[in-house]
Amino acid sequence: MVFFRHKKTTAFFISLFLSLQMAPAFAVNPDEVLSDQALEKRARTLSAGLRCMVCQNESIDDSNAELARDLRILVRDRLTAGDSDQDVLDYVVDRYGEFVLLKPRLNTRTVLLWGFPVVLLLIGGSSLLVLSRRKKVVSVNDEPLTEAEEKRLKQILKENK
């Protein structure tokens, strides 16, 4: 097999692939983990819903950025201080804006964000429905051609040869 000719190269790529798969598991440092399992679970749930402002498309729970670490610690500090999950989210949103939420809240400012895909699907679906039901107009004359029309047709066909 060609794949196994270069065992060192194959082993390197397999180990690289496996190490990259494990990278998100190391995002939360052991010193950040709370001793209370219920609080830690709440912290993980909240962290999974907050965007890393450095990475943009990762949650702070998955990110290794320093700002993400600071936000994870902030979330845990607020929870240990007795804040509810909503209080923690409100605090972080007040500080960093709605963009920090991976799933934006539904309010007057984000209704277009949530509603636009639905409106677009409705427009597309109704357009397809109208186009599929529209009948093509075909002029069909059931009457046979007269002798004069047949002669004229034969003459036109001879001229076009």
Image (cartoon, rainbow, N blue to C red):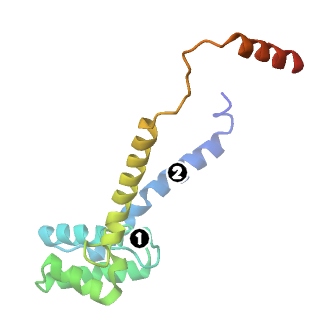
- In front here: 125 or 48? 125
Going by the numbered disc 2, the residue's amino acid type is: Phe
Q: Is residue 7 left or right of residue 117?
A: right
The residue that disc 1 covers is: 63
The dot on residue 17 is 2
Does residue 34 show up? yes
Q: Residue at x 40, y 62 (%)?
A: 24
Can you name the residue that lies furthest to the bottom here? 95
Q: Residue at x 82, y 20 (%)?
A: 156
- The answer to whether 161 is drawn above or below residue 78 in the figure is above
Q: Secondary structure at mark 2?
A: helix
Task: Name the quadrant of the N terminus.
Answer: top right
Going by the numbered disc 1, the residue's amino acid type is: Ser
Does residue 28 show up? no
- The answer to whether 62 is drawn above or below residue 10 in the figure is below
Task: Name the quadrant of the C terminus.
Answer: top right
- In front here: 13 or 55? 55
